[in-house]
Image (cartoon, rainbow, N blue to C red):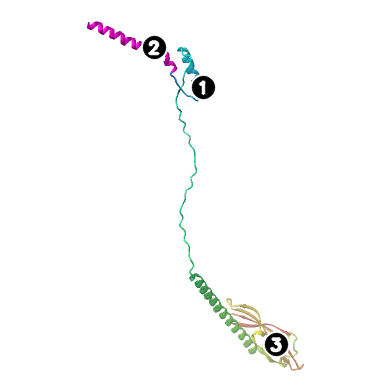
Amino acid sequence: MVKKENKKFSKVVLATIVGVSAIVGATGGALIAYNPYDSTDLKVAQNVAFKAGQDSVEPVLVPVVKTITETVEVEKLVEVEKEIFVDNGDLAFVLERLEDKLVIEDAEEIVEELKAEDTAIKGAFDYVDAESKELFDLLEEEGIISDEDEVEIVKVYNDFEDVEIITSDFDDEEYEFKLTYKVEDLDEEEKFKINVTVKVEDGEFEILSVSKQ
């Protein structure tokens, strides 16, 4: 009794296995995964289905994942510290004072130069006065007078506006002036003006030339 039941059970199991195998064999070729973007895979799947006795094949869609890399420019805000100076009026005040100081310094330098120039002019007049004989010799040599002993200075134009400054170099202590005198030729009883050019260099004086106006 036990043996018959075992045989019957074995037959049922075997039949079930065979049935399943037949179904799988009949349809297994049709269940083929393919790439829906590839027409070659679909054709192969259809051929396999036809050989397996299937009239058509339903494709099993297999998703294909594509990775696309794109470069995207992203604006980045950068914070920059900036110092802003606010003028509260002090800057203008300081600049004004500095300008005044420079003007004062320039003025002081100008005053110093003018004093040196004035000293040189005074020294030139003193030299001509002390060396009047040399002046009269030059007047005779130039034919302005006939006798150096018969001439005398009657007026000296020593005001600043009467002095022509030819050269004035404070740094090198070099000056050249044209001085004006009025002389009288006693022989000719004639009075006239003359110009005397005096050179000053390093405190030394020299009469360069004389001429009649």
Where residue 166 sits: x, y (%)? Answer: 66, 79
Q: Residues within 10 Å of mark 2 (few under 14, many from 20)?
A: few
Relative to 211, is 16 above or below?
A: above
- Which residue is nearer to you in this view: 144 or 104? 104
Q: Earlier in the sequence, mark 2 or mark 1?
A: 2
Image quarter of residue 12: top left
In the picture as drawn, the residue positioned furthest to the left comes out as 1
Question: What amino acid type is highlighted by mark number 2?
Answer: Ala
Left or right: where 132 falls relative to 11 = right
Question: What amino acid type is highlighted by mark number 3?
Answer: Asp
Main SS of the magenta segment? helix
Read off the magenta span: 1-30
Question: Label 2, on which residue?
Answer: 22
- Which residue is nearer to you in this view: 159 or 175? 159
- Which residue is nearer to you in this view: 150 or 182? 182
Left or right: where 146 falls relative to 51 = right
Report the label total. Answer: 3
In the picture as drawn, the residue positioned furthest to the right comes out as 188
Q: Earlier in the sequence, mark 1 or mark 3?
A: 1
Q: Residues within 10 Å of mark 3 (few under 14, many from 20)?
A: some
Name the residue rendered at 49%, 20% in the picture: 42
Question: Label 1, on which residue?
Answer: 39
Which mark, by number, is residue 137? 3
Relative to 174, is 129 above or below?
A: below
Q: Quadrant of the C terminus?
A: bottom right
- The kind of secondary structure element at disc 3 is helix
Is 20 included in the stretch rendered in magenta?
yes
Question: What amino acid type is highlighted by mark number 1?
Answer: Ser
Relative to 60, is 79 above or below?
A: below
